[in-house]
Amino acid sequence: MSSPRHSTSLTSDDRKIALERLAAAARAVQAAGADLEQRMAQVRAATTAAELDEVLADVPVVGRAALADSAAPLLVQPPPLEEARLAVLFRHTERNGRWTMPRVLRLAAVCGHVELDLSDAVFLPGTSRIVMRTWLSHVEITVPAWIRLEGDGTVGFTRRDDGTPASAAPPLAVVTITGDARATQVEVMPTAARIPPSHPSDRHLTPKVKP
């Protein structure tokens, strides 16, 4: 049975968003040249959502802030890794700004406070996983509207609601929370609900450790 996306026609806005995604991803991973030009031509020539999906299938997803400001220079970012680890022991660690989200992020925390802001992260297409092994910890995950975050039932989490209606558009990336979180509070909040730092210098691209 064919997917409904094979018969879904594209609008000019669909093509514009796809071109912005291509440009932002190319700058994020320093990819350019013939491949980028060819992809952009394929986006312009696509007539259905399925054809557009095929063009974008292996294009990394870049944070919406980068998509919204195509003129802003991006910091050099390597393509996302297949797997990475983050260990937190008796400390506070933050990841925010433009950082690379691996296909699998293994988070280990003991008596720690972890803040993961996915708003401007670079993703591999498809589904990424956060695999938790935590004890007596607090984990906050900030999720923009264009990411769907879901659980597989192994880790309980609460969602903060800022009153913003859910987007009807399909997500650009999916993140699944799984693992074993014992005596751990896991909070998921929309980007708008996150309290901004007092100063621009408070934002870091690498984990920040507070005493």
Image (cartoon, grey):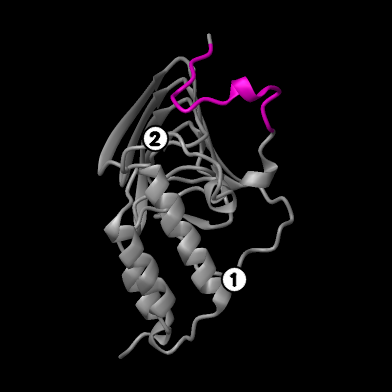
Query: Measured from the top left, where is residue 165 in percent x and y?
Result: 69, 63
User: Which residue position holds label 2?
Assistant: 76
Question: What residue sits 31% from the left and 66% below the top?
Answer: 38
Q: Nearer the viewer, residue 72 or 168?
A: 72
Q: Residue at x 30, y 54 (%)?
A: 33
Left/right of residue 100 with respect to residue 114 in the rendered view: left
Residue 59 location (% of width, % of height): 34, 57
Q: CA distance from mark 2 to mark 1?
A: 32 Å
Nearest the eye: 210 or 89? 210
Lower position in the chain sequence, tag 2 or tag 1: 2
Residue type indicated by callout 2: Val
Quarter of the image with the N terminus is: bottom left
Q: Amino acid at mark 1?
A: Ala
Secondary structure mainly formed by the magenta segment: loop
Front position among marks 2 and 1 = 2
Residue 189, compared with residue 167, is above or below; it is above
Give the residues in magenta.
196-210
* Residue under the image location 39 percent in, 66 percent down: 40
Find out whether residue 98 is within the magenta segment: no
Task: Locate residue 85 relative to residue 189 in the image: left or right.
Answer: left
Q: Residues within 10 Å of mark 2 (few under 14, many from 20)?
A: few
Vertical relation: 145 (above or below) 199: below
Q: Secondary structure at mark 2?
A: loop
Residue farthest along the right direction in this orientation: 163
Residue 193: image location, x then y, percent? 69, 43
> Residue 89: x, y in percent?
40, 17
Q: Quadrant of residue 206?
A: top left
Judging by the rendered image, the residue that carries numbered circle 1 is: 168
Does residue 170 lie above or below 156 as drawn?
below
Inspect this view and state whether residue 160 appears: yes
The quarter of the displayed image where residue 104 is located: top left
